[in-house]
Image (spheres, rainbow, N blue to C red):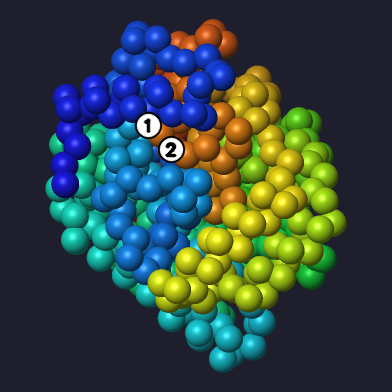
Amino acid sequence: MRFPRPAIAALVAMSLASPALADAPLPTKAERAVHERALTLDTHLDTPASLVLPGWSITQRHSVAADRTQVDVPRMVAGGLDGGFWAIYTPQGPLDPASTRAARDYAFRRAVAIHDMVAAHPDAFALADKAADAAPIAVSGRRVVYLSIENAWPLGDDPTLLQSFYALGVRISGFAHFKTNQFADSSTDAAKWDGLSPAGVQLLAEMNRLGVVPDLSHSSDAALDDALRLSKAPIILSHSGCKAVYDHPRNIDDAHLRALAAQGGVIQINSVYVKKLEQSPQRKAALDALEQRFPEDRVLTVAERADYLAARQKIDREWPEQRAGFDDVMAKLLHALKVAGVDHVGIGLDWDGGGGVSGLEDVADLPRLTTALLRAGYSEADVAKIWSGNVLRVLAAAEAEAAKEQGAPHPL
């Protein structure tokens, strides 16, 4: 299946008619044209989790209402999303050797699933290896596929295992997730290392050597401080937010935003942790029980997946979710731009990993972000930086550092 840029008009009309956009300012023809001219990359797509769903196809249009997924080829085309960084996510478990080996295998299988997607649909996707690869892939009408690691736990006690994931296309790697692990303290767990662990420092050095961009999303402020001090190349927060807008451990304060910018790094704004939301105790309890029945690291059968969706829809009907909205996400984005500057902010909305708000339900809604940025006074050149220019600059800097460390000339 192929969706080159000249064939977009019908899908654009479909996206403009979606219910999520009905009560919000929509892009004019000129604003949509700016969006289409931009190379649009999201730095945190949890969509590889969808690839293992029974009977689910990335080339068919799905919906949040029907199956809770947010990314597929038709919706990427409708939303003008050229691709991004597809996450190898591993939920944190025990740090014993057997569990860590199982996590390693789980992560490799997820990487294989991404490669299988590209191999099965060569007219729709292409793997990207270098920063310079993204634009030609997008021009060809295919979607850009870089790989990333969310949670380095599967690397075990051997940071050099990152080399194998690099060979598979990983160009961004995080350290920890919701729990502190062997590499770093998590922002949402008790501290053990006061930042990066000794193994985490070794992993950071390996990232610099290989040309992998260090990702400090989910890691603690102290770990971020360590990375800012020790990394020889700029770092990224692939899906984070601003504490000044919402004081949550997953968000960073203005001092860290400025330090990140001074180091040459980039914060990619997500669509979670954007405002305080009080969910009912009944909803929390029901969701916890559902997670016990269907743990996130288990591949469900067709029948189990249907049972899960029915149960989740029942919870949403009986105890509706309190949700943030599009303006809340924009508040984070605009604050980051004000504090860090337009050269140090991008977009990583956490699609298929908990992201999405009212008015920004899936990737078909992405033109609204470009529209809001333009109406806030940002230029087309600014928009291009935010959508991909900044992250590709950081990736190119990682490549240059790797070439320097490995003694090879860096390609122009």
Q: Is residue 32 above or below residue 111?
A: above
Q: Residue at x 33, y 32 (%)?
A: 78
Residue 410, percent across and down?
28, 46
Residue 189, percent across and down?
78, 63
Q: Is residue 179 above or below residue 4?
A: below
Q: Amino acid at mark 2?
A: Val
Neighbour tally class for label 1: few under 14, some 14-19, many 20 plus, Cα within 10 Å: many
- The C terminus: image quadrant: top left
Element under disc 1: loop
Please identify the quarter of the rendering in which residue 50 is found. bottom left
Q: Is residue 340 left or right of residue 36?
A: right
* Residue 364 visible, this orientation: yes
Q: Confirm or deny contact between disc 1 and disc 2 (CB under 8 A).
A: yes
Element under disc 2: helix
Please identify the quarter of the rendering in which residue 247 is found. top right
Q: Residue at x 66, y 68 (%)?
A: 290
Q: Amino acid at mark 1?
A: Gly
Q: Residue at x 59, y 73 (%)?
A: 294
Closer to the camera, 373 or 384?
A: 373
Q: Is residue 300 above or below residue 235?
A: below
Q: Residue at x 16, y 36 (%)?
A: 140
Residue 103, percent across and down?
51, 79
Q: Which mark is residue 371?
A: none
Q: Is residue 264 left or right of residue 329?
A: left
On the image, numbered disc 2 is attached to which residue? 363
How many badges with numbers are in the image? 2
Which of the two discs, 1 and 2, labels the residue nearer the N terminus? 1
On the image, numbered disc 1 is attached to which residue? 79
| Residue sticking out furthest to the bottom | 98
* Residue 265 visible, this orientation: no
